[in-house]
Structure formats: C-alpha cells, structure tokens
Amino acid sequence: MNLFYDNKATIDISYNLVQHDHTKHVEPTEEDKIAFSLFCFSNRKRKMENSHVLVLPFPAQGHVNPLMHFAWRIANLGSKVTFVNTDFNHKRVLSAMAGRNEPTGSDVNLVSIPDGMDPEDDRTDIGKLCEAMLITMRKKFQDLIEDINKNHPFTCIIVDGTMGWAREVADKLGIRVAMFWPASAAIFCQLANISNLNRDGYIDSDGFAIKKHKIQISPSGPIFDSDNLAWKVGNAYSQKAFFKYIERVMEDSQLIEWQLCNSIHELEAEVFSLVPKLLPIGPLLAGYDTGNSGAQFWPEDSSCLKWLDRQPSQSVIYVAFGSLTIFDQSQLQELALGLKLTNKPFLWVVRPGNSTQESNPNEFEDSHGKIISWAPQQKVLSHPAIACFVSHCGWNSAIEGVSNGVPFLCWPYFTDQFVNKSYICDVWKIGLGLDKDEKGIITKEEFKQKVELLLGDKITIKKALELKQFAEDNIREGDGMDPEDDRTDLGKLCEAMVITMPKKIQDLIEDINKNHPITCIVVDGCMGWAREVADKLGIRVAMFWPASAATFRQLASIPNLIRDGYIDSDGNSGAQFWPEDSSCLKWRDQKPSRSAIYVAFGSFTIFDQSQLQELALGLKLTSKPFLWMFTSLGDFRSTRVMLRPSAIEAIASKPSVRALSGFISDRILHFLAISFGVNKSKDHLPKMFTATEL
C-alpha cells in the first residue's frame, strides 16, 4: 500500500476511510482517465459537501492551532466542519479574531462546551483542568453532537490524541472517528509506552521518576531524561493528575483505527517505523492552502512585519516562548540584558502572563528591538530578516522553524519540549541549547555567547536550509505535483490541480489587481472551478470550449448518464451479462472474518464435469465456508447480442476487489469480441483488441 507522507495523505483519508491493504488494483484505461479528469472536481466536491466533520482539540493553544489548520483544509475540500472549543477558549478565539481580515463563517463553524472549571479557575494548572474535563465534558460533548445531528448529522469525528475519551462517545453514537496527534511521533511513542516505563522501573504507578536515566526510543532518535517526561507539569498533585489522565486517554487513542500526526516523515522516519498506524500529514502551517492563521488566543500584532521590512537580511533574533511558559522577573531581566549585549535587532514576544510578576514589557525595549504581545509566527519566521529563533521548543514552533529554514536557540520549559530540543540539537543538528548556571538562570553572557556561536556556524545554518526543503517537498505548490511527476497521467494531474490551484489563482489575481485590476477572466471549460474564484472576487467570467460542441454536450450530460445507469458515480461504465445475486452478501456477513473461500472464474472459463466434481470435493475437504460463483454460458458465446448497460454499485460478490474500471472494461471487451463474431483466441481478434489479455 502506498503511503503519502505529506498533505496528500490528509486528502486521501478524507475521501475514503476504508483501508486498502488487501485489495486488487487495476489501472484505468486512458479513456477512463480523460473522463475522470473532466468529472473529478464536481464529483469529489459533491461527495465532500455531503460530509460533516467534527473536530475536538485539547484546550491549549498548541493543540487548538494545528487542528484549526487541519479543519480549514478539510473545509476547503467542500466538507462542512464544526470545531469544538471549551467555552473559555471559544471566547478568547472570537475576541482575537475580532477585526481580523480572514475567512470566517460557514466553512468552519465554531461551537463550544464547558470544561468543568469555574471562570476564575487557573487553566494553566493542567492537572486540575484534566480532572474537570473527565467529569464534565463527555456528557456535554454527546449532548452537542445529538443536538447538531438533528439538522446535519456528523459523518466523522476527528479528536485530539489527548482527548481520546471522545472515542467512546463516537462509538456509542455510531460515528466514525480519527485521531489527530498534534505533537511529535516520538512523544506519541513515549506516552504509548507508559506501561513499559513502569514495568522496567523508570517510573512508579503515579508517573514519578524512580531512577534517573536517559532513554532513547530508537538508535538515532531523540533522547529524553526520566526527570523530564511529558507529563511533568506544575506541582506533584498536578503531575499525578495529568499522568493519570494521559494514561487513560492514550489507551483510547490507540484503539482508534485512523491515527494522523502533524509531522514530516523525513524528520522522524525511524520513529514512524515503530508506529506504522501513525500517518504523518504535516506540516500544517498557517497560510498554506487555507489563507487562515488558525485559532489564536491573543490578537496578533502584525505591525512587527513592517518593522521587519526595515531590518537587514538575516539580522533579527526572534524570541518567543509559546502560550504557557512563565519566567520569574530576574530571568526576564537577564534575557533582556543578553539581547542588548548581542548588539543585534530583536523581535521579542512577551504575552500577557509571561512573568510571575506584573511588569511593563516596554521597559526591555531599546533602539535595537521591538516587543509585542503575540505574533503572526509563520509570517515572522518566513521573513528574510530573521536570523535565528530563540524558542521554548514547542512542537508547532519546531515545525514552523524547520519549515522556514531557521536555526534555533533552545530554551525548553516543560512537557514534550525537552524531547523536541533533543531533536533540534542532537538529531537534526539545526540548533544549540542554552545552559543554566548553578542558580538555575540562563545568564546574559551565556545567551550572548550561544547567539554568536549559532550565527557563526555555517554547517548548522546549511542543515536548517536542507530540512526546509524536506518541509517544502511535503507542501504541494504550483499545480499540486512535484517536478518529476508524470503530467501525462491526467487523472493525477487533475486531482492535484483542484486541490492546489484555486487558492493559487486567487492569490495571483489579488496580487495583479493591486496595480492593474482584471476586468474579465476567460477560462478553459475544463478549468471551470475558476468560476468560483471569479465570483468571489466580483470579476466577470467567460468560458472557452476548445473541443467540439458534441463533446461539450456529452460531458454536460454526466448527471443524466449516471441517472440512466450508463456510468457509475465515479465515471466507470459497465455491464453485467447475468443478474447479480446479492443474497451472498448476507451469507458473507454471517461468516467469521477472513474465513470464507471465494471461487470465481469469470465469464469465459469452461470446465468439464469431472474437473467441476473434483473442485467441489476439494472445497468440501477444506472444511471451510465457501462462496462459489457458478455460471452457465449455454450458446451465449456464439450469439450476437445488444448490450444493455446498467449502473453498478460495485461488483459486490467480490468484496476484496477495488478500482473496478479495468475489470468492467475487460467485460465490455469480451462483449465486443463476441459482437464481432470472433472466438476468444487472441490471434483472431481485430487489431484494436490485441493490447488486452482475454
């Protein structure tokens, strides 16, 4: 089975949640490809428009943001999406979105449920938050689904891996579920192996470290210390509560069939080999395919972008510590002095609550720097003025830094950030760590020295740019295909175009409109999707058809061809010479999994009576249930008949067969051969048939 370690995997999964490990694939004919090329956009979009996806993140900024990017991608494919925040975070997101010029409304519907805490409670106490959620949210989540289902039923639920308890709700309501893991595959492995860490004596039953030890998941993977495991947060009570929560939800998450991860295969190839069910679909970044910056808890200050425009290339130190890191006043002061010592321009994000004491962030600002409360981070990191990223090493920041080729100075705070630091410094080798002194402070001298070392290290900077290429290779650009892809494969080309090009053509038009507005768009009839872009931008549009009017009429009649049974909903034509007996499906459903022998020899095979008898006895000897398709041709082979096509849901008697166009084409070919009055010997077929085995 081909796995696409990029955003194409996301799209493939959203179209079909059925796994294809044991299926037959028959390559479509060129005629199939052309028909599909012209039909795929309206057909795929129609299918997605019938779906309704619910997305449930863990209530933290680092979880909400990537899941919102994923939600927008699904919505851009035509699906209705409902995104569930907690009441507390819902208000923060709406407040941050106020006045932001980004698409909102019906594409992604924002709703909320209570998290079980009072408004004044401290939600940075993750242990207490998790305890409250387990008590309250399950019932509220089910009530929300049942209420929305009255008008537009959900077809799929995507849950954050740390909200695994939602699987039980989905199962109870009969809704398919997929798990989205917003952190690294390495952390997923760590949490999935809690029982082994306990068994081997590294931790006790409450998650506390028993012995100090460095642990490595794979031979060349990241190293984590038993003192800095992912559930080590806050005081002892919070750590125990968070550990018990993680232990429980990971059991649920691992039972979910579809497991998706916001990572890049090349960054964690060795770890992904240990968890084959976990599919990398990253990087999920702001602005790619969505035009949306996600769901922020604080308003973004975009004034920093104009400030960056005035700075020299690769000169600015960008400092940001995420949504939960807290420093005491002395450490903030030391960092400010360290930035001043570098004598370089800096952009520093000091969010509300960044310090244990109330302080005025502007007191740290000087002529070299700019301080803001929250940044449009993807836009900042992609700016040519950025030289390096001083980061807490949250996974989203790590992925964004890698995707923009920016080297790191690592300053981890808690949870998965120590493993991410190991990736950055030890595995990917694109950054340096900052070391604390005996008082637990990172001094201004240490900061200045590491900045100079990093920016003078050409090998590290070159490695960061190499990893950027890996990320870019996982983000479809242009027509949605890679340079080496075969563009004569019209089916793949059209699939890629409808995923990628509408956003690209809109961006192009908006850019050109700044100087010389476009007054009319003339689109090829096979690029009809551009009409929606033109309508959205208020530009008149004309369609040019480069082929015959007869072909236009044929393609415009696709809905009628489906209705009348000439083709199925995927554009496949087909006909059966015998009525299908669907009673076998009920018989099949009563048999144990993978127990039955299916016997079928097609429409032309002929056995003598003794061979049939021997086969029947052989089936009996196996003592296994069997389904035998037995047909009688009679004089059919010598008869010229008129084919009457009928729509085929599937050749349901063949439950393991997929990609049926080739199978159906063979049936039609057999019929044509018969109609030409020739026997089934290949030598006697007209030249047009010799390419296919009969």
Image (spheres, rainbow, N blue to C red):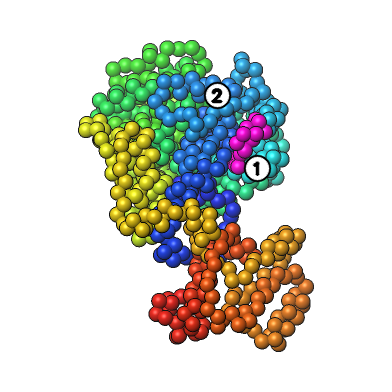
The residue that label 1 is drawn on is 175
Q: 678 or 312, which lies in front?
A: 678
Could you say where residue 2 lies in the image, as x and y percent from the top left?
Answer: 50, 58
Work out whether residue 292 or residue 435 is closer to the camera in this orientation and state it. Answer: 292
Residue 93 in the image: above or below residue 473: above
| Foreground residue among 75 and 318 | 75
Q: Nearer the viewer, mark 2 or mark 1?
A: 1
**Measured from the top left, where is residue 218 in percent x and y?**
54, 50
Please tell me the numbered disc located at residue 98: none
Q: Is residue 57 visible?
A: no
Say which residue label 2 marks: 90
Q: Earlier in the sequence, mark 2 or mark 1?
A: 2
Question: What residue lies at 68% left-to-right and 43% top-to-bottom?
Answer: 174
Q: Amino acid at mark 1?
A: Ile
Magenta range is: 144-160
Is residue 229 part of the magenta span, yes or no? no
The structure residue drawn at horizontal position 45% and vertical position 85%, both measured from the top left corner, is: 684
Q: Residue furthest left?
A: 516
Percent x, y of residue 426: 45, 43
* Callout 2 crowding tier (Cα within 10 Å): few <14, some 14–19, many ≥20: many
Secondary structure beneath disc 2? helix
